[in-house]
Image (spheres, grey):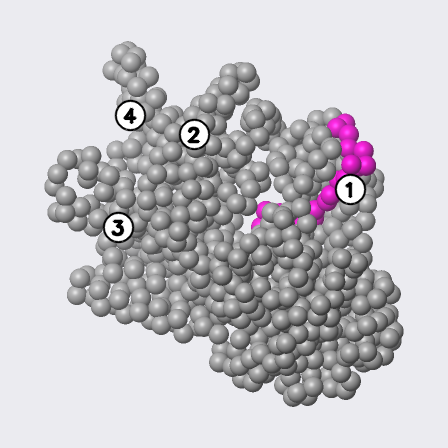
Amino acid sequence: MSRLHPLILPAAALVGGIFSASWLGPWPYLPLLAATALVLAVILGLGLAGRGISPWLLALACLLAGAGLLSLERSATLSGDHLSGLADGKTHQIEAIAMSPAQPGGRGVRLIARALKVDGGPVSGLLRLSLAPELTPPPAGSRFVMRASLRPVTSLANPGGFDYAKYMAAQGIYAQAYAGRSARLQVVGQGNVLWPGSWLLAARQRLAYQIGALAPSQGRELLRALVLGQRGGLSSQVREAFGVSGAAHLLAISGLHIGLVWGLAYALLRWLLAAWPGLALRWPVIKLAAAGALLPAGAYAALAGGSTPTLRALVMIACLVAALWASRPYRPSGGLALAALIIGLVWPESPLTLSFQMSFVAVAAILLAAAPLARWLRELSPGPRLAGALLGWLGLSGVVGLAVWPLAVQSFHQLPVYSLPANALLIPLVAMLTLPLALIAAGVGLVWATGGQALFAIAAWPAQGAVHLVEWLADLPGAVQYLAGPGPWAALLFYAGALAALTLPKRWAWGLGSGLGAAGLVLWLGLSGPPPPDGKLRAWVLDVGQGSATVVRLPRGQVMVIDGGGWGGSDFDFGRQVIAPFLWSQGFSRVEVVACSHRDSDHAGGLPFVARWFSPHQVWTNGETAESGWYARLLRTAHERGIPVLGPREIAKVHQLGGAALRLLWPPPGKGLAALSSNDRSLWLGVGLHGSWLWLPGDGGPLVEKVVARLLPTGGSQVILGPHHGAKNSLTPALMDRMKPQAVVFSSGCWGRWPSPSRQAQARARESGAALYGTNWQGCLELTSDEHAWRIMPTLARPRDCLAPWPGQN
């Protein structure tokens, strides 16, 4: 205990209470908060009696407070006038205030707005608004009216997937809207935003105009990310390149950026104050400069959105300044603990976020490892100071990389091989050249727009250079390895082992530290592989919105991926962001077959990534060719990797695979595709076990159904994925009468332009006696067959509301 700052134990207890309530709760918050008050009263009584403050009692109070505050926050409900209650997918007249400058996103721009009225009635709540490219976005702080479709924020509900709705809810956003070219958007005045919020919005908008006036480039969008914290304009390729290079932290406004701003401001103020002899002789210049530098650092944090890492950095710098003014030694660990206490008490959900965890783990690693690393480097390199500083910098970068590695791999499934040299090159270029230039431009731009824009143009040169550099680094052979990360318990054991090794006496440190680390490694490796084959046929129809993606595990353990979802006109990689995380969550690191029913982007979008990183033995297609788009990328990846591409003629010869029966019913081998529509060219695949069949028809239409119906086996238990996502002319009576399916599974979007699956397709499925399931209502659907029937388990326990109403219990 003597080696630890007295605030560390209470901070750890607060975070532990929050995690306990998250994993095991939430619990009734009133008893927890009452118990917190009781323990605090005991601490106060002991203090007044001169018996001191027990760190253990304070830790107990923080433990109870963390659990109570998180339980309180999660028990809160939205107000009755919240606009999410009106989010029904229909078009409404909306009045709102723009709460952020617009940034590129999707096919147009997007911004955050605070709703005032919907259809003339008062409402409350924030709104994520997407605008068509033809519309002029309202300036930040302005009040505007428009007609837009209003819908709730939803996630793609798949095991191992990112919970987008939860992420947005943490920002207070539960609804989203889209305004098309006929939205009649009109700015009607200035919004009622209190100062200093109004000034901040005006400043952000002023800088957004100056950055937006630059020539379009990814360098410009990097400046937008560094100054305003808006990353929507960065392409998915550039964001992925920063991640692959281990430099994604440079895209987020973090403690590094805040510390740099404070350091530069401190150096400038100290120089200016020291140049004023009368002031320098009467006042403590160093203390004044340190305190004064807090203002630009705080302004930058507010300008960039006030993320958790920036708040942590501000608290730690404020503690440094306070210690300097009090002439007391500064212990950074105390500042870190105080930052955790403040953030955890004010925003109890924050410690559960990856941003909080990576930020605090990185700084804690620096604090724990800096002194031992410095001693080791002095012994290793007693030469020039510059060489020692360079080694120290690289050493600390390596320490931080190792420290955040379990969290990064668990969340992003990336192992950046060249992280150390990449950061050695990118940190000076981005954080020490581009960022200072951008901040000087921002400071000038707030008072002189023309000068600010000229300086932003200068800053765009190193920014574009950084983009080119990171793309080159990401393209190096072997730059990244994708893998399933350790689970939370394995990561916890890793960190416990590292903490033991760095803080305990030598006789305990290495033994306990290595033992805990080895236990974490065993737990990780033991849980990261797939379960042993059990002779059953399993399939997962993934939730990919208005698209299709199915993963099949054959009785002997082989895996097939049939279609990969996707959004037309978007660079969102469904393979990287949806399918691969699901495969890793199930322990699947290789697949046997990647099959693409046809070339449409909502079926081919995720397959290039799977073909590149999961080593399939074969790629199955309908024989189409393409020059561009996701399907073309799939063919190009197969060619580059030497993966055989099979067409209908070769696929039709595969009757058994991995202990399951396979059948290709369409298109017939040798049949020309030219006369068929793109949808009717779809592969119609069947996977079966002992008479139980799962049919995957792609987007085949009624003409294809008429032919296929005559080829279907009769009897047994059959499940069909609704053709063309449940289009109104799908599931024809002839097909249903022949198949008599146990269930129809629809892969559809929850909030598209029209209700899907259609009422007509649902009705025909019901008339055939089939049970109805849908990814739009129930998320990912897991299908398991043995010798007799299919068991279908949805990911969502309670069906969600969608544009197409839930048909009810089966």
Residue 148 tag number: 1
Measured along the vertical axis of the image, is residue 172 above or below residue 543? Answer: above
Front one among 286 and 140: 140
Question: Residue at the location (15% across, 35% down)?
Answer: 384
4 or 1: tag closer to the N-terminus: 1
The quarter of the picture where the N terminus appears is: bottom left
- The residue that disc 3 covers is 369
Q: Is residue 415 visible?
A: yes
Could you tell whether 509 is left or right of 258 in the image?
Answer: left
Element at badge 2? helix
- The residue that disc 4 covers is 286
- The residue that disc 2 covers is 462
Q: Nearer the viewer, mark 1 or mark 2?
A: 2
Magenta-tinted stretch? 170-188
| Mark 1 to mark 2 CA distance (whole Å) | 40 Å
Residue type, numbered disc 2:
Pro
